[in-house]
Protein backbone atom coordinates (compact mmCIF):
# COMPACT_ATOMS: atom_id res chain seq x y z
CA UNK A 1 0.00 0.00 0.00
CA UNK A 2 2.89 2.41 0.71
CA UNK A 3 4.25 1.95 -2.81
CA UNK A 4 0.81 2.50 -4.30
CA UNK A 5 0.28 5.61 -2.18
CA UNK A 6 3.68 7.17 -2.94
CA UNK A 7 3.39 6.65 -6.70
CA UNK A 8 -0.07 8.20 -6.82
CA UNK A 9 0.66 11.12 -4.50
CA UNK A 10 3.78 12.02 -6.48
CA UNK A 11 1.75 11.98 -9.70
CA UNK A 12 -0.96 14.11 -8.09
CA UNK A 13 1.59 16.63 -6.80
CA UNK A 14 3.30 16.87 -10.19
CA UNK A 15 0.03 17.45 -12.05
CA UNK A 16 -1.16 20.09 -9.61
CA UNK A 17 2.18 21.91 -9.62
CA UNK A 18 1.84 22.33 -13.38
CA UNK A 19 -1.47 24.21 -13.09
CA UNK A 20 -2.49 25.55 -9.69
CA UNK A 21 0.50 27.85 -9.01
CA UNK A 22 -0.19 29.47 -12.39
CA UNK A 23 -3.79 30.08 -11.32
CA UNK A 24 -2.80 31.51 -7.93
CA UNK A 25 0.25 33.57 -8.90
CA UNK A 26 -0.59 34.72 -12.41
CA UNK A 27 -4.39 34.79 -12.68
CA UNK A 28 -5.92 35.32 -9.23
CA UNK A 29 -3.13 37.70 -8.21
CA UNK A 30 -3.41 39.63 -11.48
CA UNK A 31 -7.13 40.04 -10.93
CA UNK A 32 -6.50 41.55 -7.49
CA UNK A 33 -3.89 43.90 -8.93
CA UNK A 34 -6.21 44.88 -11.81
CA UNK A 35 -9.56 45.59 -10.14
CA UNK A 36 -10.01 48.25 -7.41
CA UNK A 37 -8.90 47.07 -3.97
CA UNK A 38 -12.35 47.66 -2.51
CA UNK A 39 -13.96 45.46 -5.18
CA UNK A 40 -11.58 42.59 -4.51
CA UNK A 41 -11.99 43.02 -0.77
CA UNK A 42 -15.76 42.72 -1.19
CA UNK A 43 -15.33 39.66 -3.42
CA UNK A 44 -13.08 37.97 -0.85
CA UNK A 45 -15.44 38.73 2.03
CA UNK A 46 -18.41 37.37 0.06
CA UNK A 47 -16.40 34.33 -1.02
CA UNK A 48 -15.59 33.49 2.60
CA UNK A 49 -19.18 34.25 3.57
CA UNK A 50 -20.33 31.60 1.09
CA UNK A 51 -17.86 29.09 2.55
CA UNK A 52 -19.38 29.49 6.02
CA UNK A 53 -22.67 28.09 4.68
CA UNK A 54 -21.02 25.08 3.09
CA UNK A 55 -22.43 22.92 5.85
CA UNK A 56 -25.78 23.19 4.11
CA UNK A 57 -24.22 22.86 0.68
CA UNK A 58 -22.06 19.80 1.25
CA UNK A 59 -23.61 18.36 4.40
CA UNK A 60 -20.66 16.01 4.64
CA UNK A 61 -21.83 14.04 1.61
CA UNK A 62 -18.43 13.98 -0.11
CA UNK A 63 -16.55 12.68 2.95
CA UNK A 64 -19.27 10.22 3.90
CA UNK A 65 -19.53 9.03 0.30
CA UNK A 66 -15.76 8.61 -0.09
CA UNK A 67 -15.50 6.63 3.16
CA UNK A 68 -18.50 4.41 2.28
CA UNK A 69 -17.56 3.64 -1.33
CA UNK A 70 -13.90 3.05 -0.44
CA UNK A 71 -14.97 0.32 1.98
CA UNK A 72 -17.75 -1.07 -0.30
CA UNK A 73 -17.07 -0.18 -3.97
CA UNK A 74 -19.92 -2.38 -5.19
CA UNK A 75 -22.47 0.02 -3.66
CA UNK A 76 -21.63 2.90 -6.03
CA UNK A 77 -24.25 2.26 -8.79
CA UNK A 78 -27.11 1.98 -6.27
CA UNK A 79 -25.98 4.71 -3.89
CA UNK A 80 -25.15 7.33 -6.54
CA UNK A 81 -28.74 8.37 -7.51
CA UNK A 82 -29.76 9.10 -3.90
CA UNK A 83 -26.50 10.92 -3.20
CA UNK A 84 -26.80 13.03 -6.35
CA UNK A 85 -30.42 13.90 -5.60
CA UNK A 86 -29.57 14.92 -2.04
CA UNK A 87 -26.74 17.04 -3.40
CA UNK A 88 -29.04 18.93 -5.80
CA UNK A 89 -31.63 19.56 -3.07
CA UNK A 90 -28.95 20.91 -0.74
CA UNK A 91 -27.57 23.16 -3.50
CA UNK A 92 -30.97 24.83 -3.81
CA UNK A 93 -31.36 25.24 -0.05
CA UNK A 94 -27.81 26.62 0.23
CA UNK A 95 -28.31 29.31 -2.42
CA UNK A 96 -31.63 30.46 -0.93
CA UNK A 97 -30.37 30.51 2.67
CA UNK A 98 -27.07 32.26 1.96
CA UNK A 99 -28.73 34.84 -0.30
CA UNK A 100 -31.34 35.66 2.35
CA UNK A 101 -28.67 35.96 5.05
CA UNK A 102 -26.56 38.22 2.83
CA UNK A 103 -29.56 40.47 2.31
CA UNK A 104 -30.18 40.64 6.07
CA UNK A 105 -26.53 41.58 6.62
CA UNK A 106 -27.01 44.61 4.40
CA UNK A 107 -25.64 43.55 1.02
CA UNK A 108 -27.45 45.33 -1.80
CA UNK A 109 -27.13 46.10 -5.51
CA UNK A 110 -24.00 44.89 -7.23
CA UNK A 111 -22.80 43.22 -4.01
CA UNK A 112 -25.91 41.03 -3.87
CA UNK A 113 -25.48 40.13 -7.56
CA UNK A 114 -21.84 39.27 -6.92
CA UNK A 115 -22.91 37.09 -3.99
CA UNK A 116 -25.32 35.15 -6.25
CA UNK A 117 -22.49 34.35 -8.67
CA UNK A 118 -20.17 33.32 -5.83
CA UNK A 119 -22.81 31.01 -4.39
CA UNK A 120 -23.08 29.32 -7.80
CA UNK A 121 -19.29 28.86 -7.77
CA UNK A 122 -19.45 27.11 -4.41
CA UNK A 123 -22.44 25.00 -5.45
CA UNK A 124 -20.82 23.76 -8.65
CA UNK A 125 -17.51 23.18 -6.88
CA UNK A 126 -19.35 21.02 -4.31
CA UNK A 127 -20.96 19.04 -7.14
CA UNK A 128 -17.54 18.50 -8.71
CA UNK A 129 -16.11 17.43 -5.33
CA UNK A 130 -18.91 14.89 -4.92
CA UNK A 131 -18.21 13.41 -8.35
CA UNK A 132 -14.48 13.30 -7.64
CA UNK A 133 -15.08 11.66 -4.25
CA UNK A 134 -16.51 8.66 -6.10
CA UNK A 135 -13.52 8.50 -8.45
CA UNK A 136 -11.07 8.68 -5.52
CA UNK A 137 -13.08 6.11 -3.53
CA UNK A 138 -12.53 3.66 -6.39
CA UNK A 139 -8.79 4.33 -5.91
CA UNK A 140 -8.53 5.88 -9.38
CA UNK A 141 -6.25 8.56 -7.99
CA UNK A 142 -4.52 9.51 -11.24
CA UNK A 143 -7.87 10.08 -12.90
CA UNK A 144 -8.97 12.14 -9.90
CA UNK A 145 -5.76 14.18 -10.10
CA UNK A 146 -6.48 15.07 -13.73
CA UNK A 147 -10.07 16.01 -12.86
CA UNK A 148 -8.79 18.20 -10.02
CA UNK A 149 -7.02 20.54 -12.44
CA UNK A 150 -9.69 20.70 -15.16
CA UNK A 151 -11.53 23.70 -13.72
CA UNK A 152 -8.35 25.70 -13.07
CA UNK A 153 -6.96 24.90 -16.52
CA UNK A 154 -10.09 26.28 -18.18
CA UNK A 155 -10.03 29.36 -15.94
CA UNK A 156 -6.38 30.03 -16.76
CA UNK A 157 -7.15 29.96 -20.48
CA UNK A 158 -10.25 32.17 -20.30
CA UNK A 159 -9.11 34.65 -17.62
CA UNK A 160 -5.63 34.77 -19.12
CA UNK A 161 -7.13 35.85 -22.43
CA UNK A 162 -9.35 38.48 -20.78
CA UNK A 163 -6.43 39.88 -18.76
CA UNK A 164 -4.00 39.98 -21.69
CA UNK A 165 -6.16 41.11 -24.63
CA UNK A 166 -6.01 44.95 -24.48
CA UNK A 167 -9.73 45.68 -25.13
CA UNK A 168 -10.82 43.40 -22.25
CA UNK A 169 -7.81 43.97 -20.00
CA UNK A 170 -8.55 47.68 -19.65
CA UNK A 171 -12.21 47.04 -18.81
CA UNK A 172 -11.80 43.94 -16.63
CA UNK A 173 -14.30 43.73 -13.76
CA UNK A 174 -14.61 41.42 -10.80
CA UNK A 175 -17.97 40.23 -12.19
CA UNK A 176 -16.15 38.75 -15.20
CA UNK A 177 -13.91 36.81 -12.84
CA UNK A 178 -16.92 35.31 -11.07
CA UNK A 179 -18.75 34.47 -14.31
CA UNK A 180 -15.68 32.69 -15.70
CA UNK A 181 -15.45 30.50 -12.62
CA UNK A 182 -19.14 29.55 -12.87
CA UNK A 183 -18.74 28.43 -16.50
CA UNK A 184 -15.52 26.48 -15.83
CA UNK A 185 -16.83 24.65 -12.77
CA UNK A 186 -19.93 23.60 -14.71
CA UNK A 187 -17.79 22.26 -17.57
CA UNK A 188 -15.48 20.40 -15.15
CA UNK A 189 -18.45 18.81 -13.34
CA UNK A 190 -19.93 17.64 -16.66
CA UNK A 191 -16.60 16.12 -17.67
CA UNK A 192 -16.24 14.47 -14.25
CA UNK A 193 -19.65 12.83 -14.58
CA UNK A 194 -18.70 11.51 -18.02
CA UNK A 195 -15.57 9.91 -16.57
CA UNK A 196 -17.42 8.45 -13.57
CA UNK A 197 -20.09 7.00 -15.84
CA UNK A 198 -17.43 5.11 -17.75
CA UNK A 199 -15.39 3.77 -14.81
CA UNK A 200 -18.13 3.41 -12.17
CA UNK A 201 -21.08 2.22 -14.27
CA UNK A 202 -23.34 4.97 -12.85
CA UNK A 203 -26.30 6.51 -14.66
CA UNK A 204 -27.76 10.00 -14.52
CA UNK A 205 -30.75 9.06 -12.41
CA UNK A 206 -32.48 10.99 -9.67
CA UNK A 207 -34.15 9.56 -6.62
CA UNK A 208 -36.21 12.27 -4.97
CA UNK A 209 -37.69 9.76 -2.59
CA UNK A 210 -37.95 11.74 0.62
CA UNK A 211 -37.05 8.78 2.80
CA UNK A 212 -33.87 8.01 0.81
CA UNK A 213 -32.75 11.65 0.75
CA UNK A 214 -33.33 12.06 4.48
CA UNK A 215 -31.45 8.82 5.09
CA UNK A 216 -28.41 10.15 3.21
CA UNK A 217 -28.61 13.52 4.99
CA UNK A 218 -29.00 11.87 8.40
CA UNK A 219 -26.00 9.61 7.81
CA UNK A 220 -23.83 12.49 6.64
CA UNK A 221 -24.93 14.97 9.34
CA UNK A 222 -21.85 14.47 11.61
CA UNK A 223 -19.62 15.18 8.63
CA UNK A 224 -21.71 18.26 7.81
CA UNK A 225 -21.35 19.59 11.34
CA UNK A 226 -17.58 19.17 11.12
CA UNK A 227 -17.46 21.10 7.84
CA UNK A 228 -19.55 23.89 9.36
CA UNK A 229 -17.31 24.22 12.42
CA UNK A 230 -14.13 24.14 10.34
CA UNK A 231 -15.57 26.74 7.96
CA UNK A 232 -16.28 29.02 10.90
CA UNK A 233 -12.79 28.97 12.36
CA UNK A 234 -11.12 29.09 8.94
CA UNK A 235 -13.19 31.74 7.14
CA UNK A 236 -15.14 33.87 9.62
CA UNK A 237 -12.18 36.24 9.99
CA UNK A 238 -12.67 37.86 6.57
CA UNK A 239 -16.37 38.51 7.19
CA UNK A 240 -15.68 39.85 10.70
CA UNK A 241 -12.87 42.02 9.38
CA UNK A 242 -14.94 43.52 6.59
CA UNK A 243 -17.66 44.43 9.12
CA UNK A 244 -15.64 45.25 12.28
CA UNK A 245 -12.38 46.84 11.16
CA UNK A 246 -12.15 50.60 10.67
CA UNK A 247 -10.85 50.07 7.12
CA UNK A 248 -12.57 46.73 6.57
CA UNK A 249 -12.38 46.30 2.80
CA UNK A 250 -8.68 47.22 2.64
CA UNK A 251 -7.80 44.96 5.59
CA UNK A 252 -9.73 42.10 3.99
CA UNK A 253 -7.81 42.61 0.74
CA UNK A 254 -4.51 42.40 2.63
CA UNK A 255 -5.59 39.21 4.39
CA UNK A 256 -6.76 37.74 1.06
CA UNK A 257 -3.40 38.48 -0.59
CA UNK A 258 -1.57 36.59 2.15
CA UNK A 259 -4.10 33.76 2.32
CA UNK A 260 -3.67 33.24 -1.43
CA UNK A 261 -0.17 31.87 -0.96
CA UNK A 262 -1.15 29.87 2.11
CA UNK A 263 -3.96 28.32 0.07
CA UNK A 264 -1.44 27.50 -2.66
CA UNK A 265 0.83 25.83 -0.11
CA UNK A 266 -2.16 23.96 1.31
CA UNK A 267 -2.71 22.35 -2.08
CA UNK A 268 -0.11 19.84 -0.86
CA UNK A 269 -2.10 19.04 2.26
CA UNK A 270 -5.39 18.83 0.41
CA UNK A 271 -3.92 16.38 -2.08
CA UNK A 272 -2.75 14.16 0.77
CA UNK A 273 -6.08 14.41 2.61
CA UNK A 274 -8.12 13.67 -0.52
CA UNK A 275 -6.11 10.52 -1.14
CA UNK A 276 -5.71 9.51 2.50
CA UNK A 277 -9.44 9.41 3.29
CA UNK A 278 -10.26 6.48 0.93
CA UNK A 279 -6.88 4.85 1.62
CA UNK A 280 -7.42 4.95 5.39
CA UNK A 281 -11.05 3.91 4.89
CA UNK A 282 -10.10 0.77 2.99
CA UNK A 283 -7.19 -0.08 5.29
CA UNK A 284 -9.35 0.25 8.41
CA UNK A 285 -12.10 -1.86 6.80
CA UNK A 286 -9.48 -4.56 6.20
CA UNK A 287 -8.03 -4.04 9.72
CA UNK A 288 -4.60 -3.15 8.34
CA UNK A 289 -1.96 -1.23 10.31
CA UNK A 290 -2.13 2.50 9.45
CA UNK A 291 1.01 3.52 11.35
CA UNK A 292 3.42 3.18 8.36
CA UNK A 293 1.24 5.43 6.16
CA UNK A 294 0.83 7.99 8.97
CA UNK A 295 4.58 8.15 9.57
CA UNK A 296 5.31 8.31 5.84
CA UNK A 297 2.93 11.25 5.35
CA UNK A 298 4.24 13.20 8.35
CA UNK A 299 7.83 12.69 7.17
CA UNK A 300 6.94 13.87 3.67
CA UNK A 301 4.83 16.89 4.64
CA UNK A 302 5.92 18.43 7.94
CA UNK A 303 9.64 19.07 7.28
CA UNK A 304 8.73 20.60 3.91
CA UNK A 305 6.06 22.74 5.58
CA UNK A 306 8.54 23.95 8.21
CA UNK A 307 11.01 24.90 5.47
CA UNK A 308 8.39 26.85 3.54
CA UNK A 309 7.12 28.59 6.68
CA UNK A 310 10.59 29.70 7.80
CA UNK A 311 11.48 30.86 4.28
CA UNK A 312 8.33 32.98 4.11
CA UNK A 313 8.96 34.39 7.59
CA UNK A 314 12.42 35.71 6.73
CA UNK A 315 11.83 36.60 3.07
CA UNK A 316 8.12 37.46 3.14
CA UNK A 317 8.63 41.17 2.54
CA UNK A 318 10.44 40.54 -0.75
CA UNK A 319 7.87 37.95 -1.87
CA UNK A 320 4.96 40.29 -1.20
CA UNK A 321 6.69 43.14 -3.03
CA UNK A 322 7.17 41.05 -6.17
CA UNK A 323 3.57 39.86 -6.17
CA UNK A 324 1.66 43.00 -5.21
CA UNK A 325 3.76 46.13 -5.71
CA UNK A 326 1.66 46.97 -8.80
CA UNK A 327 -1.50 47.11 -6.70
CA UNK A 328 -2.66 50.53 -5.53
CA UNK A 329 -3.14 49.36 -1.93
CA UNK A 330 0.42 48.04 -1.63
CA UNK A 331 1.92 51.51 -1.96
CA UNK A 332 -0.04 52.57 1.13
CA UNK A 333 0.12 49.40 3.23
CA UNK A 334 3.13 47.44 1.98
CA UNK A 335 4.47 46.70 5.46
CA UNK A 336 1.15 45.16 6.51
CA UNK A 337 1.30 42.69 3.63
CA UNK A 338 4.62 41.17 4.73
CA UNK A 339 3.72 40.94 8.44
CA UNK A 340 0.37 39.28 7.77
CA UNK A 341 1.93 36.92 5.22
CA UNK A 342 4.73 35.84 7.56
CA UNK A 343 2.29 35.20 10.40
CA UNK A 344 -0.11 33.17 8.25
CA UNK A 345 2.59 31.02 6.68
CA UNK A 346 3.85 29.98 10.12
CA UNK A 347 0.57 28.06 10.46
CA UNK A 348 1.40 25.85 7.46
CA UNK A 349 3.05 23.03 9.49
CA UNK A 350 -0.05 22.92 11.71
CA UNK A 351 -2.27 22.56 8.65
CA UNK A 352 -0.19 19.61 7.42
CA UNK A 353 -0.33 17.82 10.77
CA UNK A 354 -4.07 18.36 10.89
CA UNK A 355 -4.58 16.95 7.38
CA UNK A 356 -3.01 13.64 8.38
CA UNK A 357 -4.49 13.03 11.82
CA UNK A 358 -7.96 14.54 11.35
CA UNK A 359 -8.35 12.54 8.12
CA UNK A 360 -7.43 9.37 10.01
CA UNK A 361 -10.09 10.13 12.65
CA UNK A 362 -12.64 10.89 9.92
CA UNK A 363 -11.94 7.60 8.13
CA UNK A 364 -12.46 5.77 11.41
CA UNK A 365 -15.78 7.53 12.02
CA UNK A 366 -14.71 9.33 15.22
CA UNK A 367 -17.03 12.22 14.42
CA UNK A 368 -17.96 13.04 18.01
CA UNK A 369 -14.31 13.59 18.87
CA UNK A 370 -13.69 15.64 15.74
CA UNK A 371 -16.74 17.84 16.25
CA UNK A 372 -15.93 18.44 19.91
CA UNK A 373 -12.40 19.55 19.03
CA UNK A 374 -13.64 21.72 16.17
CA UNK A 375 -16.28 23.35 18.41
CA UNK A 376 -13.54 24.32 20.84
CA UNK A 377 -11.59 25.76 17.93
CA UNK A 378 -14.58 27.88 16.88
CA UNK A 379 -15.01 29.39 20.35
CA UNK A 380 -11.30 30.16 20.61
CA UNK A 381 -11.07 31.56 17.08
CA UNK A 382 -14.13 33.81 17.25
CA UNK A 383 -13.15 35.16 20.68
CA UNK A 384 -9.61 36.00 19.53
CA UNK A 385 -10.85 37.57 16.29
CA UNK A 386 -13.41 39.64 18.20
CA UNK A 387 -10.65 40.95 20.42
CA UNK A 388 -7.78 41.36 17.92
CA UNK A 389 -9.41 42.45 14.63
CA UNK A 390 -10.67 45.88 15.85
CA UNK A 391 -7.20 46.57 17.29
CA UNK A 392 -4.83 45.08 14.71
CA UNK A 393 -6.90 44.45 11.57
CA UNK A 394 -5.50 41.83 9.20
CA UNK A 395 -2.53 41.11 11.45
CA UNK A 396 -4.91 40.24 14.29
CA UNK A 397 -6.77 37.84 12.02
CA UNK A 398 -3.51 36.23 10.91
CA UNK A 399 -2.31 35.78 14.51
CA UNK A 400 -5.64 34.18 15.41
CA UNK A 401 -5.37 31.79 12.46
CA UNK A 402 -1.84 30.78 13.48
CA UNK A 403 -2.85 30.07 17.09
CA UNK A 404 -6.02 28.21 16.05
CA UNK A 405 -4.46 25.94 13.43
CA UNK A 406 -1.39 25.07 15.50
CA UNK A 407 -3.43 24.31 18.61
CA UNK A 408 -6.02 22.20 16.79
CA UNK A 409 -3.32 20.25 14.92
CA UNK A 410 -1.72 19.18 18.19
CA UNK A 411 -5.08 18.21 19.71
CA UNK A 412 -6.03 16.13 16.62
CA UNK A 413 -2.66 14.40 16.79
CA UNK A 414 -2.98 13.56 20.52
CA UNK A 415 -6.46 12.09 20.12
CA UNK A 416 -5.46 10.06 17.05
CA UNK A 417 -2.48 8.59 18.92
CA UNK A 418 -4.72 7.63 21.85
CA UNK A 419 -7.58 6.16 19.81
CA UNK A 420 -5.41 4.12 17.45
CA UNK A 421 -2.72 3.26 19.98
CA UNK A 422 -0.01 4.62 17.69
CA UNK A 423 3.44 3.98 19.15
CA UNK A 424 5.09 6.82 21.07
CA UNK A 425 8.34 7.26 19.16
CA UNK A 426 10.20 9.86 21.23
CA UNK A 427 13.26 9.82 19.00
CA UNK A 428 11.13 10.50 15.90
CA UNK A 429 9.29 13.37 17.63
CA UNK A 430 12.54 14.93 18.86
CA UNK A 431 13.95 14.64 15.34
CA UNK A 432 11.10 16.78 13.98
CA UNK A 433 11.49 19.34 16.78
CA UNK A 434 15.25 19.45 16.26
CA UNK A 435 14.81 19.90 12.53
CA UNK A 436 12.43 22.83 13.08
CA UNK A 437 14.80 24.57 15.50
CA UNK A 438 17.80 24.04 13.23
CA UNK A 439 15.93 25.35 10.19
CA UNK A 440 14.78 28.43 12.12
CA UNK A 441 18.37 29.13 13.18
CA UNK A 442 19.67 28.68 9.64
CA UNK A 443 16.95 30.98 8.33
CA UNK A 444 17.92 33.71 10.76
CA UNK A 445 21.62 33.32 9.95
CA UNK A 446 21.00 33.35 6.20
CA UNK A 447 18.78 36.45 6.26
CA UNK A 448 20.90 38.37 8.80
CA UNK A 449 24.55 37.53 8.27
CA UNK A 450 24.80 36.65 4.58
CA UNK A 451 24.80 39.82 2.52
CA UNK A 452 23.58 38.94 -0.95
CA UNK A 453 20.66 38.83 -3.35
CA UNK A 454 17.60 37.77 -1.38
CA UNK A 455 16.33 35.22 -3.90
CA UNK A 456 19.75 33.54 -4.01
CA UNK A 457 19.74 33.45 -0.20
CA UNK A 458 16.28 31.85 -0.21
CA UNK A 459 17.21 29.24 -2.83
CA UNK A 460 20.41 28.21 -1.04
CA UNK A 461 18.58 28.10 2.30
CA UNK A 462 15.81 25.87 0.95
CA UNK A 463 18.34 23.60 -0.79
CA UNK A 464 20.23 23.12 2.48
CA UNK A 465 16.96 22.35 4.26
CA UNK A 466 16.05 19.76 1.64
CA UNK A 467 19.42 18.12 2.25
CA UNK A 468 18.78 18.11 6.00
CA UNK A 469 15.64 16.05 5.41
CA UNK A 470 17.93 13.22 4.28
CA UNK A 471 20.34 13.82 7.19
CA UNK A 472 17.45 13.53 9.65
CA UNK A 473 16.24 10.47 7.68
CA UNK A 474 12.76 11.86 7.05
CA UNK A 475 13.44 10.92 3.44
CA UNK A 476 15.71 8.02 2.53
CA UNK A 477 16.95 7.29 -0.97
CA UNK A 478 17.09 3.59 -0.17
CA UNK A 479 13.52 3.49 1.15
CA UNK A 480 12.24 5.43 -1.85
CA UNK A 481 13.88 2.94 -4.20
CA UNK A 482 12.30 0.06 -2.31
CA UNK A 483 8.88 1.70 -2.42
CA UNK A 484 9.05 2.37 -6.12
CA UNK A 485 10.48 -1.00 -7.13
CA UNK A 486 8.69 -3.58 -4.99
CA UNK A 487 5.21 -4.88 -5.55
CA UNK A 488 3.17 -3.62 -2.59
CA UNK A 489 0.20 -5.38 -1.15
CA UNK A 490 -3.22 -3.91 -1.34
CA UNK A 491 -2.79 -1.94 -4.54
Image (spheres, rainbow, N blue to C red):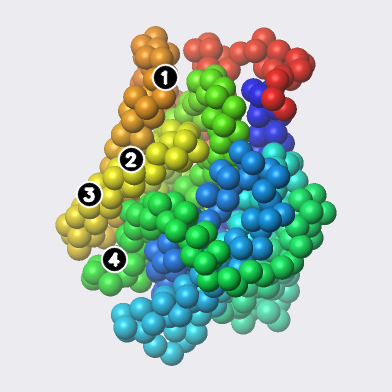
| Residue that badge 4 annotates | 240
Measured in 3D between alpha carbons, the distance from the residue under mark 2 to the one under mark 1, in whole angstroms, is: 17 Å
Q: Residue visible at 75% across and 57% down?
A: 202
Q: Residue visible at 47% across and 36% down?
A: 364
Instruction: Name the disc covering residue 301, or none.
Output: none
Indicate which disc, 3 or 4, sits on the residue closer to the N terminus: 4
Indicate which disc, 4 or 2, sits on the residue closer to the N terminus: 4
Q: Is 268 in front, or is 97? A: 97
| Residue that badge 3 annotates | 380
Indicate which disc, 2 or 3, sits on the residue closer to the N terminus: 2
Considering the numbered disc 4 on the image, is that residue within a helix, a strand or a loop?
helix
Packing grade of label 4 (10 A; few <14, some 14-19, many >=20) is: many
Indicate which disc, 4 or 1, sits on the residue closer to the N terminus: 4
> Where is the N terminus found, in terms of image quarters?
top right
| Residue that badge 1 annotates | 422
Q: Position of residue 416 (x, y in %)?
A: 39, 29
| Residue that badge 2 annotates | 369
Amino acid sequence: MQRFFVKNILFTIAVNLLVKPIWVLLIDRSVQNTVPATEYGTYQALFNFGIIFQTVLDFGISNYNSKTIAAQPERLPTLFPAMLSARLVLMGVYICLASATGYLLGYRGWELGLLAGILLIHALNALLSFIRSNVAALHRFKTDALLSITDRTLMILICGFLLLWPPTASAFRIQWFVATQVVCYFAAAALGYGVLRRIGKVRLQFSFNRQEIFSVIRSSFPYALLIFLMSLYNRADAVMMERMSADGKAETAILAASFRLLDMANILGLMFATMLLPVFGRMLARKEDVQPIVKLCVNMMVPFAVTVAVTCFFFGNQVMYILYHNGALYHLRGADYSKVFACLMMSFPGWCIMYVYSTLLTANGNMKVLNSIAAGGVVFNLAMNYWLIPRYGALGGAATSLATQTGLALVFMVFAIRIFGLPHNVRWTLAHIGYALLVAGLGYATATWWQGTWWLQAIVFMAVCMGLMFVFRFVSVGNLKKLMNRQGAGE
